[in-house]
Amino acid sequence: MTIESIRVALAPWYLQIKFVHLLAVMVWIWSTSVAYMSYLVPVFKAWRRNPGDRGLIAMRDWVMDRFDEGVIYEHVAFPVILVTGPLLYIAGGWSTGAAWLMLKLLVVAGVMVPMELCDYYLSHFGGNKRRIRGSDRPQRHEAMVHAHWWFLLVTTPAVAVFSLLIVFLAVTKPI
Amino acid sequence: MSMPDPAEPAPATFGGRPRHYLRISIGLGLGLPAYLYGGMVVIEYLIRGEAWILGWKPVVAAIVFAALYMRLSYRWMMDLDGQLGSGSRWSLPERIVRLPERGHRPEV
């Protein structure tokens, strides 16, 4: 089956695929924003100011556990974006001639995918804090909380800037 | 504020310091625009033969982006990590909080 035959088969469904793609992008970008800004960050700030406070550590661990759960929406949406994006590329007959799209794909492939892979690990796999605490490994748990906070510190500016850039490029197609 | 329990080991200290945040911000501020501009040069100029990507506007855009990103990233990381401000407006009165998940409840 050639790309052209796939394009012909998908073309009538372009707008429906775009609907799913946009919906997934919305969930991916915004689903954790309130939990992050209004719950996780204030508690972590307080912990960083008072790192030995047992009450704050308990609250920090609880918030982190809830955040690991809440980020599931984002992490379901992201693969949907990765599947529907190439389908749109094929169905719409796009090519490397669309510079805005190439820049967007560079951001997704080089910035967002590595970032999300780290996030998957920290939230659901080896770095899942609830599971580690259940296995009674306090040092590993503390190390993973620190690793996750490092991750959030480093990626927050990048997520904000590049998420906006992705949406801006897709909507305005400036180049 | 809760008093530390001497029977429990002290929690490990988080290693992030302002100098780390500055280095990371400079590194990402240089690396990300370099990657994006380099990628666009490969796609537009080397693959498609379009020379507009070598003009002054994309170069200036990449440099401005780098400068803004470095400043934004450093300030943002410092703010998130509670490093900015004195913190004097924060109070930490102790409260009894019942957390819903069993795993977070203290042993009785």
Image: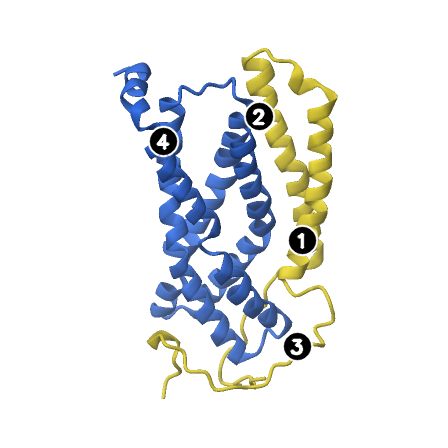
Chain colours: A blue, B yellow
A45 is higher (above) or lower (below) than B65: below
Q: Which residue is mark 4?
A: A15
> Between residues B12 and A88, which one lies in front from this camera angle?
A88
Residue A17 at what x, y percent from top left?
34, 33
Q: Which residue is mark 3?
A: B90
Answer whether residue A126 is visible to the viewer in this image. no
Residue A7 at what x, y percent from top left?
32, 19
Of the residues shown, which amino acid type is indicated by label 1?
A: Tyr
Q: Callout 4 environment at 10 Å: few (<14), some (14 to 19), or many (20+)?
A: few
Q: How many marks?
A: 4
Q: Earlier in the sequence, mark 1 or mark 2?
A: 1
Q: Looking at the rendered structure, which numbered label has been put on residue B21?
A: 1
Q: Which residue is mark 2?
A: B39
Of the two numbered discs 1 and 4 in the rendering, the one whose residue sits closer to the viewer? 4
> Between residues A131 and B75, which one lies in front from this camera angle?
B75
Q: Could you tell me which chain the residue with mark 1 belongs to?
A: B
Of the two numbered discs 3 and 4 in the rendering, the one whose residue sits closer to the viewer? 4
